[in-house]
Image (cartoon, helix red, strand yellow):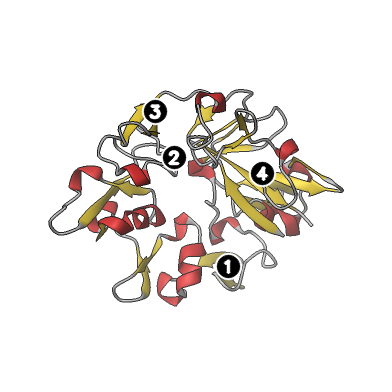
Amino acid sequence: MKIYLIGFTLLIIANSATTLSLSSVYQCQCENLLQQSDCLSDYCTWDPNESTCSNKPCSGFSQEDCFGVPDPFNCTWNYTTSKCEEFTQCSDYTFKTAEGEKCYDLIKCQVDVDTIDNTAGTVKCMDRTQDSAMSIGSCDKVPYDECNWLVTPDGKQCVKNTTAKTCEAKTITQCSDYATIDLCNTQSCYWGDTCKPLTCSILPEESFTFCKWETDKCIDLDTTTLTQTQCLPFTLYSYAWNPDSKKCEICQEGSSSSEFLIYGTLLLAIMLN
């Protein structure tokens, strides 16, 4: 199975696509796993007496697993001690300005552009201002080279002004609003003769966005058709198997369907082999 993430800030959503708000993605934790066969031994502990599955402590995870566990585990990697630790709060974390993207590796955090310290060469993190993995407080203080489709609290996007070499907030409602190939948001769109939206139907086998590869084409994934063994991994730990209903169900509510382009939504593309 290959899993790819695209469209962190905006994406056209087809009628039959399964869509999740960002706050619902990757939100399953061990307590959502109601059967021993689903209780993943690498991340969870099964209690045979209580028939419950619980999270392992952060201290037991390697760096790779620390980055990989869902947000509800509340784990984060400490680059100073090289240990996986309990996450505290966004404002407790400071990074070198050039490494500000590490704020986005934390739990629901973003760069606080107002704390950029040019003397010390550091920047602090802050709570995410909206339900977007590319969230930012404002565009005007974002360095030109880092001005890549960040999303402001009022739903605008940071877009490069190639003439003034500045980062500006623009209202983007569709991919065609990106005027040139250099500005076309490659996380949500692709360039043809104009900037066009990524959808499951146009993606090749090597590049994906909640979809599946079937025979020779990419189609929208219907989560209601997933089996118990497919449910957790094929939805990027956003759904878990319910033994009572015998269905693959979302761990945290917030799914939606729409025919138009929206902000703050992450459409997952999954190839099922």
SS of the residue at dot 3? loop
| Tag 3 residue | 156
SS of the residue at dot 4? loop
Query: Between marks 4 and 3, how big is the CA–CA gap?
Result: 25 Å
> Contact (CB < 8 A) between labels 4 and 1?
no
Q: Earlier in the sequence, mark 3 or mark 1?
A: 1
Q: Earlier in the sequence, mark 4 or mark 1?
A: 1
Judged by depth in the image, the label closer to the viewer, 3 or 2, is 3
Query: On residue 138, which mark appears?
Result: none
Q: Quadrant of the N terminus?
A: bottom right
> Contact (CB < 8 A) between labels 3 and 2?
no
Name the quadrant containing residue 6. Answer: top right
> Contact (CB < 8 A) between labels 2 and 4?
no
Q: Residue at x 55, y 54 (%)?
A: 28
Mark 1, Cα crowd under 10 Å, few <14 / some 14-19 / many 20+, is few
Q: Toward the viewer: 35 or 67?
A: 67
Query: On residue 50, which mark appears?
Result: 1
Q: Quadrant of the C terminus?
A: bottom right
Query: Between marks 3 and 2, how big is the CA–CA gap?
Result: 12 Å
Q: Amino acid at mark 3?
A: Lys
| Tag 2 residue | 132
| Tag 4 residue | 210
Q: Amino acid at mark 1?
A: Glu
Q: Residue at x 30, y 32 (%)?
A: 164
The image shows a total of numbered marks equal to 4
Q: Residue at x 64, y 44 (%)?
A: 209
Judged by depth in the image, the label closer to the viewer, 3 or 1, is 3
Residue 98, how many percent across, how many down?
Answer: 30, 57
Query: Between marks 4 and 1, how big is the CA–CA gap?
Result: 34 Å
> Would residue 56 be seen by someone viewing this image from the given angle?
no
Name the quadrant containing residue 38. Answer: bottom right
Q: Residue most toward the right?
A: 215
